[in-house]
Image (tube, rainbow, N blue to C red):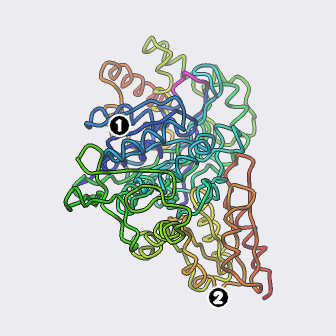
Amino acid sequence: MASFQLRFSGTGGQGMMLIGDLMAHYYGLKKDKQIVLLKSYGPEARGGACRSELIVDDHQCYPAITSPDFLLCMSKQSYDLYTKDINESTIILIDEELVSEVDDKHNSIYKIPLTNIAKEKTGKTICANIVALGAITKILNLDHDVMLEVLKEKLPSKILDINLFAFEEGFKYLEN
Amino acid sequence: MGSYQIMTGNEACARAAIAAGMSFFAGYPITPATEIAELCSELLPQNNGVYMQMEDEIASIGAIIGASAAGKKVMTATSGPGFSLMQENLGWAHINEIPCVIVDVMRKGPSGGSATLPAQADIMQTKWGSHGDYRSLVVVPNSVEEIYTETIRAFNLAEKYRQPVILLYDAVLAHMSEKIYVRDLDEIEIINRSKPSCDKKDYNPFNYESSKVAPLASFGEGYKIHFSGLTHDETGFPVSNQNTTGLEVLIHHLFDKIDDNYDKDIKKYETFMVDDADVLVVSIGITSRSAKAAVAAARKQGIKAGLFRPITMWPFPHDDFSRINLKSKAIVTAEMNNGQLNQVVIEDIDRNQKLVMKNLYDGNQIRDIDILNSIIEANKYEQ
């Protein structure tokens, strides 16, 4: 297959590096794919635009994104910055309350109130990235149960339950 | 049984060094090499080793030289600015034949340059950085897995040939994660320096009669050892300026111990579709992955392209490269600098062959499409 390219973007502190790690674990260690994971962030720990990028392939990966097949934007700034190299079939997922204005030319865009779901269902906005992971699992038709295994293997036990809950909320949002 | 793991290039370097038997690391943090020191500071105390935070890079290489002379397997890691500071002591390690591994994670220079941006502009510095005649041993991996395996090979070469070995890669490889296969320790070949078996009073720390490497006693074991940066004889004490033979044999030895064994376990390179290649791309490190993609794309267009990738950068495999490029009408060098690899390649091609250079030094990786364009341009050349 040709490589599959994913970009997870937002603001420092929203967990965009973690979502890259979890997806890399899913494809690399659970699905026997080759992966390259690239992380990019400014000097600030919180507040600046940041992204992690994952390239998935059957063979050694070309170590750069040429045009993303999937793009997550969890802030207006990241939407403005990281949509420049998308193509007409790029699947886009945005937090609809944080990315208020979007180009009407996107063919495949999912608008979900990710942060609001996290806040209402788990009481913690910080779980928004895992809500997004649930939605991504649904959108990309990934293996739900395997993704649960990934969460159980990668997350510390004291924050696992709340994140498993957040994951399911994101997964089932699109079923409604 | 080993296992598959996901890790960054810098993490692979630190973990491989531990697997190779490193027991001492001294360093000073610098982007993009910092994570190697960070992880060594965590892993070494857990593995009966010592991590030492130094005041600068001059002290860092000094400390690993001292620890190696005391019998430890040692490493330091830095980037261009720190590597520049290490050059005097690097020469000292060469003339005294001290096994050590030095990691240079390349960032854009010169000088402080751009700390977070990758480059491949230290290729020549790793060969000629210190003054005087000596044989550099430099390995250039192009993936996280190869950083792991080449770090272990760097330790083995350093111990076997009693000299510094440089592990050279760039900021992209340092920070990107890949899935790698990590072998169990009993599956990894580990070479340790040979130790003296002679009577203690008969021991000399150097052997200049042949290319054979002298066994290395450690300080504290009771052998008489003397090291000096001055040109010395087999006892380690300085040679008189009138003793021209004595001044010469030391240099011969530094070259012969590498050159006589080059084909055994030092030379290493990868070729991809070179057998009928009209256009041969030469590239190292992260850029070689764009080059490989470009070669594959060129083949799909019917252009006979191939790739030659040194894994041991120095000494460069001149004989093999000369043989492999014989049938090619054009050579393309692709590198993230303003022209270094091309100067090596030009020694091995003749006037009928065209050299096309693809250089980029704006802090971005060279894309496969750009190398493909260079291949297409090179393919238009009529011999």
Q: Identify whether A8 is placed above or below A27.
A: above
Of the pair B327 and B75, the residue shown nearer to us: B75
> Helix, strand or loop at disc 2?
loop
Q: Residues within 10 Å of mark 2 (few under 14, many from 20)?
A: some
Indicate the chain on which mark 1 is placed.
Answer: A
Tell me residue B96's x, y (percent). Answer: 44, 55
Image-based side of B61 in relation to A151, left or right: right
Could you tell whether B185 is left or right of B266 in the image? left
User: In the rendered image, which quarter contains the C terminus of chain B?
Assistant: bottom right
Q: Quadrant of the N terminus of chain B?
A: bottom left
**Is residue B304 visible in this depiction of the protein?**
yes
Q: Which mark identifies residue A150?
A: 1
Residue A142 at least partly seen: no
Q: Please tell me whether residue B9 belongs to the stretch shown in magenta.
A: no
Identify residue type, mark 2: Lys
Task: For marks 1 and 2, give the one nearer the viewer.
Answer: 2
Residue A74 tag number: none
Report x, y in % for residue B35. Answer: 48, 36
Percent across and percent down for residue B221 are 23, 47
Image coordinates of residue B71 in percent, x first then y, are 30, 47
State the extent of the magenta-drawn residues as a range: A11-15
Residue at the spot 47% in from the left edge and 61% down from the top edge? A59
Q: Which mark is residue B327?
A: 2
Q: Amino acid at mark 1?
A: Val
- Main SS of the magenta part reads loop
Give above or below for B142 relative to B18. below
Residue shown at 72%/45% (left/top)? Answer: B110
